[in-house]
Amino acid sequence: MRTIANISRILTGLLFVFSGFVKAIDPIGSMIKFTEYFEAFGLEFMKDGALGFGVLLCVAEMLIGLFLLYKIRFRFSAWLLVGFMAFFTILTFVLAVFNPVSDCGCFGDAVHLTNWGTFFKNLVLLIPTGFIFIYRNKFRVNKSPFFHNIVPVGLLAICIFIPYYNYNHLPVFDFRPYHIGANIPQGMIVPENAEADQFETTFIYKKGGVEKEFTMDNYPWEDTTWTFVDQKSVLVKKGYTPPIHDFILTDQYGIDVTTKILTSKVSTLLLFSENLSHTSVSAFEKAKNINDWARQNGFNMYVVTSSSTDIINKFGQYISYPFNFLTADQTMVKTVIRSNPGLVLINNGTIINKWHANDLPSVESLSPDPVSLSLTMITNARHWWMSVSLIFVVIVFAAFFSYTNFLSKKENVD
């Protein structure tokens, strides 16, 4: 039982750390998912707290996982694990049955599971959870004051820092289809043999004052005594959906300019702002200089927003600068970049670089050559390595501690 108990603890801990981490690197995505939940269950009054709930969930998952790996406050952690699993197993069952949200978001954008897949995943996870809970009092733990009190504070600080950093900068890992290096036109391609959506069509006919529904196989097309009333189609099976399916840009006249921008040989800077009423005005002040630089160096630059025409006009008057505005779907804008506003460099349909509002490049750092400009990704790489290194140190140290205790003959697990 020693082997089973320890394997259960290590695997469950690692899974919780992974689940929390992929949410923590994209706190905006977690906020969007919680907003979907609140809307689906009629809890719109809680939407203002969606970001807080998202951060709380990812921090809790990482802490539970790390506490299991380190065997810190183990009895409390075991009870917390059982409560956590009980609640989310019930929740995912409700989601699977009623399907109010298509993707639970339990692994962020890193791994997509259906609601039934998530429920069955939780059912399987209940097995190691049971072993951990049953043997919670038989694990040998480090009871030193430092390890019992100081280490948890350090782990909590790390778990809070990760979502804080990624909220104020772009996610260190970008699992969305609009990551750096992605070619947008290629992401829109539907393979020739791709499965199409399947619909079930029902025809409603009326005869003698009575309405009756028919299918494609038995509707009375030859019987003139029936009068056609209506028809309805219901999606019974979802077909293939390309990774990018809603990237559509329109100008102020309602003309679709998507193809023009994606096929242009001229590099294009797109400043995405989901909502101009809640955007960073200081970032737009910096963007003015970038726009001037773009004009002087043969770049195109547009502001892409999902705001209404009235808000666009008012915002243009407020900042007193002639940006070229394009409109797009709100979901697409939020998916492209987790920042309001956020800058994206596109060259021949390929995303060369992306900048958060807090990291907009200075004019001095820009280069007319998009390849040279993409070298600014080195800065992003530094941020990436900093966060990854923190997680790596924590996991390695936890694995080492678990391994030494696993081999220790003093551990008393029956």
Image (tube, rainbow, N blue to C red):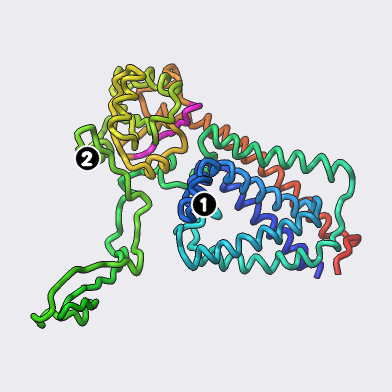
Quarter holding the N terminus is bottom right
Horizontal side, residue 73 vs residue 296: left or right? right
Q: Position of residue 176 (x, y in %)?
A: 45, 46
Overall secondary structure of the magenta section: strand
Horizontal side, residue 237 vs residue 74: left or right? left
| Disc 1, SS | loop
Name which residue lies at 34% across and 69% down: 236
Name which residue lies at 31% across and 27% down: 301
- Label disc, if present, on residue 380 of the rendered structure: none
* Circle 1 residues within 10 Å: few <14, some 14–19, many ≥20: some
Name which residue lies at 24% across and 77% down: 213
Circle 2 sits on which residue?
256
Q: Position of residue 55 (x, y in %)?
A: 60, 43
**Outermost residue to the front:** 209
Horizontal side, residue 198 vs residue 14: left or right? left
Marks 2, 1: nearer the viewer: 2
Name the residue type under label 2: Asp
**Res 343 → quadrant:** top left
**Res 256 → quadrant:** top left
Q: Position of residue 34 (x, y in %)?
A: 52, 49
303, above or below 180, in the image: above
Between 187 and 255, the one nearer to me in the picture? 255
Name which residue lies at 71% across and 61% down: 82
Instruction: Judge whether residue 221 is colored magenta.
Output: no
Circle 1 sits on which residue?
110
Question: Magenta segment, which residues?
Answer: 350-359
Horizontal side, residue 123 vs residue 34: left or right? right
Q: What separation in Å lies between label 2 and label 1 (alpha carbons)?
A: 31 Å
Q: Closer to the N terminus: mark 2 or mark 1?
A: 1
Name the residue type under label 1: Ala
Q: Does the rendering let one see residue 248?
A: yes
